[in-house]
Image (tube, rainbow, N blue to C red):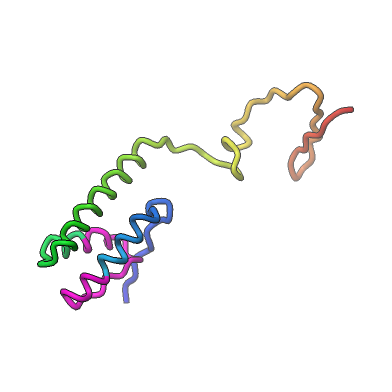
Amino acid sequence: MHTTPPTAPSELSRERIRLMLMMRRMVREEFGVTVLLGDAEAAEELAAFAGRARNTLLRQMGRELEALAATAASAAAAEPATLRYRGGGGHPRGRDKTRRAGTAHLSRPGGGVSFPVY
């Protein structure tokens, strides 16, 4: 049995998941096919079934799903890829070497520690 990796959670909004779940139920009722939402091509499969559906609501949902996918793709392309280190602005090796006044830095083999100087 061949399984595909699930879609990254960052690509799926709450609204898109809700829409896909409703569409999957309607596709199962009309076509007797269960679309696995963990598949990478689940949205494309649902949109293809929606295009062939007799149910006008399912066709409308298919158009909405395609619009959501297009906006998610354009937003992902516009967002620059940056390194994140534990919620910080970037990787610690790329940070500015200047220190705030009133702090000292202690270097140790496991990593440095900054602390206030009183």
Percent position (x, y) of residue 104? 81, 29
Kindly identify the residue that appears in the image at 32 percent across and 77 percent down.
1
Percent position (x, y) of residue 113? 77, 38
Relative side of 51 to 22, left or right: left
In front here: 97 or 84? Answer: 84
Residue 76 on the magenta segment: no
**68 over 24 or under it: above or below:** above
Residue 41 on the magenta segment: yes
In front here: 111 or 51? Answer: 51
In front here: 81 or 102? Answer: 102
Q: Which residues are magenta?
A: 25-46
For this orientation, the residue located farthest to the right is 118
Q: Quadrant of residue 76?
A: top left
Where is the C terminus found, in terms of image quarters?
top right
Relative side of 99 to 21, left or right: right
Kindly identify the residue that appears in the image at 52 percent across and 39 percent down.
83
- Total marks drawn? 0
